[in-house]
Image (cartoon, grey):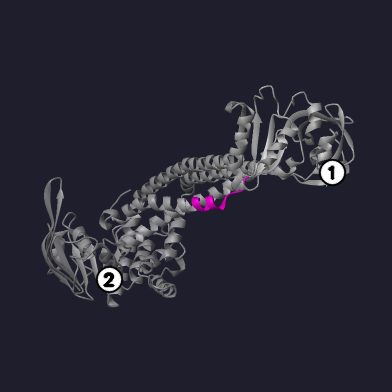
């Protein structure tokens, strides 16, 4: 469960203060499929960084599964990212020198999972995205869609409580993007919590619920027509 | 986790082979300089010490430069035996003469002396006998020769067969009464003339134009500890003999020389080792430089690793291990090259300098320390990168 209470984040750019998040309040329950939608520059990335524990809020409280994140140390944040959050980035962010298998295995190594359990979990995750037979391929030997599926398998392998996807279809063609959204639906049906950050209205509409962000202000979207206004 | 870090460091080193090798080169050169220089100095010290100690350390060597027109005779020298601390005594006359047998002739270092010389110098005769009192007393033309002379000039198949044969020294026939034991290779290497013969002091006086009166003699003390006492006593005796003229003679105390030489060699080892250590240090700076480049290049990788849960410690370990691996591999290659270079020196020059295990240990420890010291800064820099900055780095 994600809960934001009056969360603010301020950047200083060229001497002027920019409020990327301004007293944001929101709540996402376990098992929800939520899209966060907003035009570029609206504070989407900041929101995603804070939800993903990649950055800390300047003011307010962020509770993840009831735990206050704001005063965690860098090492504790790393542990939370590792155990609770599965990232899916726009540009995949796979390590180019590692094979698909090794990429999926990496977060499990950081979790100090035993060798045999690691093997089982990697196999399960790669099978889930249908890429087990491509496990020895390096990212450069895979198509964009396949790379993104490896990234999803990497997120799946640690069985996180939250999948955090940042423009996951941004670098994919329409058909591959469509397949990926299907995969998200399947993950959602299997009981996972999914937060999808996007500026694409059509993708945003896939989620059961949408949250919009405009100039650092966060609010719920009541119906799909409102999404069109935002983007 | 450690195994994974090792694997990652290894693959990172392999993925940039040329760069890794050039980085290691600094360490390789440093280690080679350290190991080869120290081994050579060590080996040379050992060999020179062997030469000096083969002359005996319980030894006074006396040179008389001005006999005031009253040279010391053999019988007068013998009166020195009354000194309580004296064990043995022998006059020494040296000359270089042509030794000839048949068509073979070579310059030979000839020592004219008495029986005591063999005792003082610890000379061992393998065949026959050494010069005895009767030889000296009767001015007999007998000689004890070294195996090289027997082999090369007398052309005997077994060096022992030389005993009883006759050869010419400075044109005078001498009969061989004894053959010395084979010399230590390390000692003979440092001698300028490889042929030597010992003859009675009295025979040398007749043979050589140089020897008139005793200009040089050797003495040993009853024990090593009494040598300094003996030096004092001999000095007093010579002062009385030569009208209190301190410049008329020189006494060389071998144990003092030995001590001084040890000191010089030790200083040289430390100095050369220090210079070599500086080149290792420069190698370490090379490692730091490349690690810093590597950290910047891999900023995005660090960001991804941090996003999926690598803590600061994990990133630090990964980069530190990489630096340590570079320095240790450089060290291993350096030690191997040093071994090769020392073998090459042996093959080319004949000088055998064994690789000293201590210096190998020192270079391994030093390389580890350098990898650690110069690796920690780049590793910390990598570990401290903020995940969002690293993720969005477009390098």
Report whether B103 appears left or right of B240: right
Left or right: where B35 falls relative to B352: left
The chain identifier of the residue carrying mark 1 reads B
- Quadrant of residue B178 in the image? top right
Question: Which residue is depicted at the point 60% across and 46% down?
Answer: B226
Residue of label 1: B159
| Chain letter of disc 2 in the image | A
Instruction: Return the x and y of residue B249 as percentages of the image width and height.
Output: 62, 29
Q: How far apart are marks 1 and 2 (CA)?
A: 89 Å
The one nearer the camera, A114 or B226, is B226
Q: In which quarter of the image is residue A106?
A: bottom left
Which is nearer the eye, A179 or A110? A110
Q: Where is residue B5 in the image (x, y as percent from the top left)?
A: 42, 61
Determine the secondary structure under disc 1: helix
**Compared with residue B177, is residue B104 higher up or lower down, i.e. above or below?**
above
Between residue B365 and residue B106, name the one nearer to us: B106
Q: What stretch is highlighted in magenta?
A: B353-363
Is residue A229 in view from this perspective? no
Mark 1 vs mark 2: tell me if same chain: no
Q: Residues within 10 Å of mark 1 (few under 14, many from 20)?
A: many
User: Please, is residue A214 above or below residue B170 in the view?
Assistant: below
Q: Where is residue B348 in the image (x, y as percent from the top left)?
A: 67, 39
Q: Is residue B300 visible?
A: yes
Q: Give the label on residue A84, or none.
A: 2
Majority secondary structure in the magenta region: helix
Label 2 CA crowd tier, 10 Å (few <14, some 14–19, many 20+): many
Quadrant containing the N terminus of chain A is: bottom left
SS of the residue at dot 2? helix
Q: Name the outermost residue toward the bottom.
A: A190
């Amino acid at each position: 469960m994600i809960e934001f209470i009056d969360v603010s984040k301020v950047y200083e750019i060229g001497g002027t203060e920019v409020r990327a998040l301004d007293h944001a309040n929101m709540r996402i329950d376990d098992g929800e499929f939520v899209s966060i939608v907003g035009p570029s520059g609206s504070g989407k990335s900041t929101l995603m960084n804070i939800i993903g524990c990649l950055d800390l809020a300047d003011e307010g409280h962020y509770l993840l599964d009831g735990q206050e994140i704001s005063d965690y140390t860098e090492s504790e944040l790393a542990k939370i990212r590792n155990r609770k959050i599965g990232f899916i980035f726009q540009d995949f962010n796979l390590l180019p020198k590692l094979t698909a298998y090794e990429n999926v295995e990496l977060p499990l190594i950081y979790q100090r999972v035993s060798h045999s359990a690691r093997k089982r979990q990697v196999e399960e995750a790669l099978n889930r995205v249908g890429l087990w037979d491509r496990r020895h391929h390096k990212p450069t030997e895979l198509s964009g869609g396949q790379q993104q599926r490896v990234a999803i398998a990497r997120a799946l392998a640690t069985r996180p409580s939250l999948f955090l996807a940042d423009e996951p279809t941004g670098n994919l063609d329409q058909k591959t993007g469509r397949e990926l959204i299907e995969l998200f639906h399947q993950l959602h049906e299997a009981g996972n919590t999914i937060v999808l950050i996007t500026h694409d209205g059509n993708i945003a509409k896939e989620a059961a619920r949408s949250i919009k962000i405009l100039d650092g202000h966060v609010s719920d979207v009541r119906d799909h027509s409102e999404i069109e206004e935002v983007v | 986790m450690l195994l994974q870090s090792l694997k990652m460091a290894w693959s990172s080193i392999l993925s940039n082979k040329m760069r890794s090798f050039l980085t290691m080169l600094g360490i390789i050169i440093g280690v080679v300089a350290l190991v080869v220089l120290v081994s050579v100095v060590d080996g040379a010290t050992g060999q020179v010490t062997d030469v000096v100690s083969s002359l005996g350390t319980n030894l006074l060597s006396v040179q008389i430069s001005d006999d005031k027109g009253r040279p010391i005779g053999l019988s007068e020298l013998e009166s020195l035996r009354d000194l309580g601390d004296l064990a043995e005594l022998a006059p020494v006359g040296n000359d270089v003469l042509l030794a000839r047998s048949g068509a073979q002739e070579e310059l030979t270092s000839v020592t004219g002396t008495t029986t005591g010389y063999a005792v003082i110098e610890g000379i061992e005769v393998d065949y026959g006998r050494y010069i005895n009192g009767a030889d000296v007393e009767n001015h007999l033309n007998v000689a004890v020769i070294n195996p090289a002379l027997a082999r090369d000039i007398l052309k005997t198949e077994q060096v022992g067969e030389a005993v009883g044969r006759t050869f010419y020294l400075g044109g005078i026939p001498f009969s061989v009464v004894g053959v010395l034991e084979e010399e230590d290779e390390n000692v003979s290497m440092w001698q300028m003339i490889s042929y030597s013969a010992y003859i009675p002091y009295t025979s040398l006086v007749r043979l050589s134009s140089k020897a008139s009166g005793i200009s040089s003699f050797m003495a040993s003390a009853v024990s090593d500890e009494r040598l300094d006492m003996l030096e004092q006593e001999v000095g007093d005796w010579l002062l009385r003999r030569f009208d209190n003229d301190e410049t008329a003679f020189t006494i060389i105390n071998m144990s003092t020389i030995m001590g001084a030489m040890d000191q010089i060699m030790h200083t040289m080892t430390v100095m050369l080792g220090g210079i070599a250590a500086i080149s290792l240090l420069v190698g370490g700076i090379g490692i730091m430089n490349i690690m810093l480049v590597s950290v910047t290049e891999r900023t995005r990788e660090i960001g991804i690793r941090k996003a999926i849960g690598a803590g600061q410690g994990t990133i630090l370990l990964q980069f530190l291990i990489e630096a340590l691996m570079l320095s240790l591999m450089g060290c291993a290659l350096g030690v191997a090259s040093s071994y090769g270079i020392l073998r090459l020196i042996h093959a080319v020059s004949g000088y055998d300098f064994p690789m000293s295990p201590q210096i190998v240990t020192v270079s391994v420890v030093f390389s580890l320390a350098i990898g650690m010291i110069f690796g920690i800064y780049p590793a910390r820099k990598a570990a401290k990168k903020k995940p969002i900055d690293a993720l969005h780095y477009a390098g």
